[in-house]
Amino acid sequence: MPKEPKKEIDEIQKIAESLSEIERKIIPYLEERDIKKLEKLSELDRVSIVRALNFLKNKGLIKLEIGRQKIIELGVNGVLYKKKGLPERKFLNILEEIRKTLSIEEIKKQSKLSNNEFTAALGALKNKALIELKDKKISLKTSKEELMEKTFEEKLIETLPRPLDKLAPEELQALENLKKRKNIIEIKDQQKISYSLTELGIEVSKISEKISEKLIEQITPNLIKNQEYKGKKFRRYDIISPVSKIYGGKRHFTNQAIDHARKIWTDMGFKEMTGSLIQSSFWNFDALFTAQDHPVREMQDTFFIDKQTELPDKKIVTAIKKAHENGVDGSKGWRYKWQEQEAKKLVLRTHTTCLSAQTIAKLNQKDLPAKFFAIGTNFRNETVDWNHGFELLQSEGIVIDENANFRHLLGYLKQFAKKMGFEKIRFRPAYFPYTEPSLEGDVWDEEKKQWIELIAAGIFRPEVTEPLFGKPIPVLAWGPGFGRMLMAVFNIKDIRELNKNDIEQLRKIKFLVE
């Protein structure tokens, strides 16, 4: 075999001498393709290993692919069932041991399963045709041999955690069955890293360990003073290979957007309203002419706190009571007996409009005209999904001016939407309990080629303004769902992502004013 040219040997030597400490620590173990084992062997954390792998890739010593993969892991119940068996196994064991028909109540009592577990086990066994249910009595429909064989769900649980893309068709079906049940499995999105040494990497790895002990990483006072540099080499600095991109620290994009919206309103002459996340039902509902028997004031819609508070100035309370019972300015009100005890209940605020009511109540005639805004978190008892959450962001605005009219309201909304990046906006008539006239606003999504509803607005009814201000006065009011507006701005498909700290997403999303 011909000798390798001296030039190539020198190049390999130079590359080996340019390796950083973390590169030298992992390169002897790169034949090990499992990154968890690599962490253990190199005694480096995952972040340092990924950084070292990128450095080695830039030098052409490895082939590196970094992607994402979904991993199926056991949930809280899954960990328990892996150890003790699925509820249906306990169910079957009882039937197999007794070998006779039992009533539902008898099996439930003997199995000691919770209601949820029993229902899930019963459904799973019926679907697999392993049992027969007749006249509320259950019997086995399978042989002892078939009974001993584990189900696909049991087999899958025993093998977890595993990548989703490695599952066989029958395991995918078992996964779908387990997903319907509570806390048995979790599917997590994880980073997937694969790497392999190139021919150059193999040659460099052969000599890297031999020279690492003689390399000096940095100059220190002691190094010079004690002449510790003698007989050693300084590590070569690689000034040619591209380096990994550096992402400087920055605020979360949701916080950036809140700051941007705050600047829009202040630039338009608005003052900010602030207030507690915990409000009395008086300010959250009654002051906004929401009847005390309205469905929104039920536990299924609102988070109540098991305490009560005192009501504000008696003059305002009396005026609100009158508006509810008999109306104002010619209206008839809600025609019921208004209760102070109901108004004293504490709630997690369901909207920032309660701040508007409190602000109006503090104003005098000499303070007008006035403009206020708020951006804040609110809470509603919603089922959490891609478009709903129990915690939501809202942007609130009011203009109190005896000369204000509906056209002014449209102008403010158009200006705000435009500054948030929406060029096309349209308005439609709507109904809300405390505004008349009322409207909803849609913005145009160019990518989806469709209108998206984002804005709710109107002019406060006299039943709201007269009790608070002392006389009916035009108050332009709006409260767009700020979270949904951000979904449209950032092209986010799931509202829960607004509060996530996914580093890849944070790097990827650029705010509209950057």
Image (spheres, helix red, strand yellow):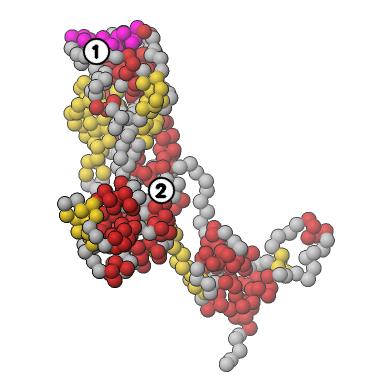
Q: Determine the CA span between mark 1 and mark 2.
A: 53 Å
Q: Quadrant of residue 412?
A: top left
Is residue 260 left or right of 221 when viewed as pictured?
A: left
Residue 337: image tag = 1
In this orientation, which residue lies closer to the viewer: 328 or 325? 325
Residue at the spot 29% in from the left edge and 23% down from the top edge: 477
Q: Quadrant of residue 174?
A: bottom left
Q: Which residue is mark 2?
A: 509
Q: Position of residue 403 (x, y in %)?
A: 27, 14
Residue 288 vertical placement versus 32 (above, below):
above
Magenta includes 481? no
Q: Position of residue 225 (x, y in %)?
A: 83, 58
Magenta includes 322? yes
Residue 508 vertical placement versus 353 (above, below):
below
The kind of residue on which mark 2 rests is Ile
Is residue 394 left or right of 427 when viewed as pictured?
A: right
In this orientation, which residue lies closer to the viewer: 364 or 341? 341
Residue at the spot 61% in from the left edge and 63% down from the top edge: 43
Which range is magenta? 315-331
Query: Quick one: label 1 or label 2, which is nearer the N terminus?
Result: 1
Residue at the spot 31% in from the left edge and 58% down from the top edge: 94
